[in-house]
Amino acid sequence: MSDSSRCPCNSGLLYKECCQPLHLNKSVAEDAEKLMRSRYSAFQLGLVDYLLDTLHPSKRHPGERQALQESVNNTQWLGLKILDHKAANNLAEVEFVAFYEDDPIGQLHERSRFTREAGRWFYHDGLFLPAVKLGRNENCFCGSGKKFKHCHGG
């Protein structure tokens, strides 16, 4: 990914200003939403080590690396939309929809739980939610800046 590329997490920032410092362990996510965005970008970019490092240690199992690698290899992510972020003390939830290539376009709608330990946020687990209905006149989830109806909804 080039230094002038937009970040895959759809923050509107350049990758080098957004998720790259987290992926390179030059900084840590200041909140769970930022970690969620960086994990989405890591899935899109195939950064399995980062995904393992940001998964809560209690959730790591012997087949985790292989499962993550298969997910990365078999899914073409198209866009991320953050719907809600709530935090209290060292616990947080982020509700998001991640869109992926399928026929029709697939959705992963999840309310993820995060915990903060020793100054670092970790993904803990998530609750899958029903697909969201996209309005034809809202901005497309892919970050193109076009209306959904003129982009992936057309």
Image (tube, rainbow, N blue to C red):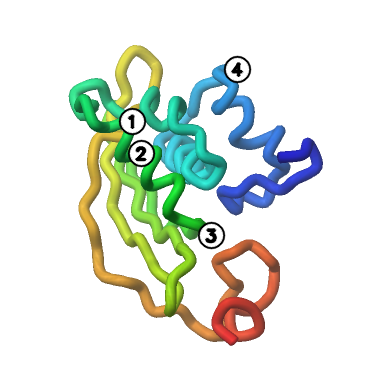
Location of residue 150 by image quarter: bottom right
In the picture as drawn, the residue positioned furthest to the right comes out as 4
Q: Are there few (<14), some (14-19), or many (20+) residues within 10 Å of tag 2?
A: some
Q: Secondary structure at mark 2?
A: helix
Q: Amino acid at mark 4?
A: Lys
Q: At 37% across and 44% down in the image, what residue appears?
A: 70
- Residue, disc 2: 68
Which image quadrant: the C terminus?
A: bottom right
Q: Secondary structure at mark 3?
A: strand
- Mark 2–mark 1 Cα distance, whole angstroms, equals 5 Å
Q: Which tag is nearer the camera, tag 2 or tag 3?
A: 2
Q: Amino acid at mark 2?
A: Leu
- Mark 2–mark 3 Cα distance, whole angstroms, equals 18 Å
Disc 3 and disc 1 in contact, CB within 8 angstroms = no
Disc 2 and disc 1 in contact, CB within 8 angstroms = yes
Q: Amino acid at mark 3?
A: Gly
- Residue, disc 1: 65
Q: Earlier in the sequence, mark 3 or mark 1?
A: 1
Label drawn at residue 26? 4
Location of residue 93 by image quarter: top left
Which image quadrant: the N terminus?
A: top right
Q: At 64% across and 78% down in the image, what residue appears?
A: 151
Q: At 45% across and 73% down in the image, what residue appears?
A: 105
Q: Earlier in the sequence, mark 2 or mark 3?
A: 2
Label drawn at residue 79? 3
* Residue 88 visible in the snapshot: no
| Location of residue 60 in the rendering, given as x and y in whole percent from the top left corner | 23, 26
